[in-house]
Image: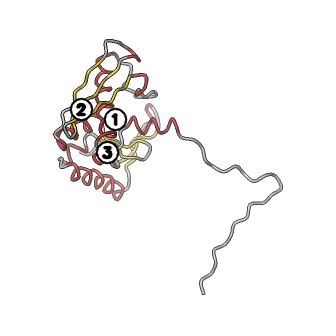
Amino acid sequence: LIPDSLAGVYVGTGQNRKFEAFPPEVVQANCFLIVNQSVRWGLDPFAVAQSTSVVRGKLCYEGKLVAGVISAKLGIDLDYDFNDKGGDDLEVTVTGVVGGRSKVVKGTVKEWKTTGDGSPWGKGNESNKRMLRYRGAREWARAYTPALMLGVYTQDEMLDAADRARDITPPPPPAGIEQQTIAPKEEK
């Protein structure tokens, strides 16, 4: 009953799409990561597992889970205020109190939305408000309670990272120059 993304991967498209299961040790390792994080947060691992996915080989947690963890673990209920604009100009102000002081993070759809297949952004203001709440909760936690977020990534972070990735493969040697490899020294 674990999410498919922890147990395998779908390959192909359309009628040729099929599920290829991971080896049992990979499934166990994925589940161990969920249980470990759940223990750190003091939450039910089965509930946490249902709010996870794997994106580009990294375990990712849904924004609603991150918002819930802030409330459950820290007892901080964040407040979300929106401007009166729509579309990409819709902005959220996220406020929470830490150490008796209000801490604020702001962001707009334009700044935080992801694009590509399956992106939940752009389906109307109510959907965008929900996404801004979840993204804002994560951004707020990263800024003001970073220990809570150590090793925790959300899907939009992984997609954003992929957009910023650059190829660091070294160029091939110039023509006429053979690449040499150095053999390891033998131990005596």
- 132, 47: nearer the viewer: 132
In the displayed structure image, the side of residue 122 where residue 81 appears, left or right? left
Secondary structure, mark 2, is: strand
Instruction: Indicate whether 120 appears above or below 22.
Output: above
Find disc 3 in the rendering and name its residue: 146
Mark 1: give few (<14), some (14-19) or many (20+) Cα within 10 Å: many
Which residue is located at x 21 percent, y 35 percent? 97
- The residue at the far bottom in this view is 188
- Report the amino acid beneath label 1: Glu
Q: Are marks 1 and 2 in contact (CB under 8 Å)?
A: no
Q: Earlier in the sequence, mark 1 or mark 2?
A: 2
Find disc 2 in the rendering and name its residue: 102
- Report the amino acid beneath label 3: Pro
Q: Residue 150: horizontal and vertical position, in percent? A: 33, 49
Mark 2: give few (<14), some (14-19) or many (20+) Cα within 10 Å: few
Give the quadrant of residue 138.
top left
Secondary structure, mark 1, is: helix
Secondary structure, mark 3, is: helix
Q: Earlier in the sequence, mark 2 or mark 3?
A: 2
Q: Earlier in the sequence, mark 1 or mark 3?
A: 1
Q: Tell me the number on the disc at residue 139.
A: 1
Give the quadrant of residue 132.
top left
- 64, 101: nearer the viewer: 101
- Report the amino acid beneath label 2: Ser
Q: Residue 173: horizontal and vertical position, in percent? A: 75, 53
Q: CA distance from mark 2 to mark 3?
A: 16 Å
In the displayed structure image, the side of residue 168 where residue 28 appears, left or right? left
Specify how the rendered protein is coloured: secondary structure
Q: CA distance from mark 1 to mark 3?
A: 10 Å
